């Protein structure tokens, strides 16, 4: 009978797992967020941040395709038309700063 290991391997957090993110196109906002996944926004300038879409979900916009929200993104560099990627794990586990939908209204 094998002896149990006193030092079990550390289990990586969900965000540390090997995963190829996908660029969200036809998915709805509600499909892109959840307890097991979160959104990240990316700008052509290189800015990357987690994205909290709670304000949009509270306004009942969850059934709209995520691509319809890209023109609402405004990067600190001034550019518009950022893009979204869906990542595994809960929001807040990546260590990136978080941008909020509530702060992006025109």
Image: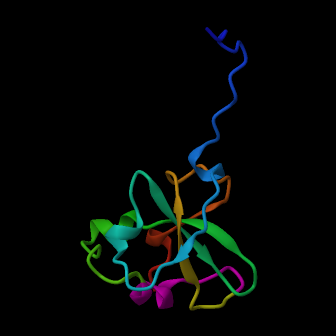
Residue positioned 38% across, 85% down in the render: 26
- How many callouts does the rendering have? 0
Q: Quadrant of residue 77?
A: bottom right
73 is within the stretch colored magenta: yes
Question: With respect to residue 104, does 50 lie above or below?
Answer: above
Where is residue 72 shown, x and y percent of the image? Answer: 47, 86
Classify residue 54 as left or right of residue 19: left
Where is residue 87 shown, x and y percent of the image? Answer: 54, 63
Residue positioned 28% across, 76% down in the render: 61
Q: Residue furthest front?
A: 1
Question: With respect to residue 41, does 3 lie above or below?
Answer: above
**96 vs 55, nearest the viewer:** 96
Where is residue 21 shown, x and y percent of the image? Answer: 58, 69
For the N terminus, the quadrant is: top right
Residue positioned 67% across, 88% down in the render: 78
**42 vs 79, nearest the viewer:** 42
Where is residue 73 shown, x and y percent of the image? Answer: 53, 83
Q: Which residues are magenta?
A: 67-77
80 is within the stretch colored magenta: no
Q: Colour scheme in the image?
A: rainbow
Classify residue 92 as left or right of residue 2: left
Residue positioned 24% across, 72% down in the render: 60
């Amino acid at each position: 009978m094998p002896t149990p290991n006193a030092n079990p391997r550390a289990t990586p957090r969900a965000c540390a797992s090997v995963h190829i993110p996908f660029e969200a196109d036809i998915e709805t906002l509600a499909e892109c967020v959840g307890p097991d996944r979160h959104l990240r926004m990316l700008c052509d300038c290189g800015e990357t941040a987690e994205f909290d879409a709670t304000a949009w979900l509270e306004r009942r916009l969850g059934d709209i395709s995520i691509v319809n929200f890209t023109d609402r993104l405004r990067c600190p560099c001034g550019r518009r038309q950022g893009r979204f990627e869906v990542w595994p794990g809960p929001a807040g586990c990546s260590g990136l700063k978080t941008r909020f939908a509530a702060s992006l209204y025109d």
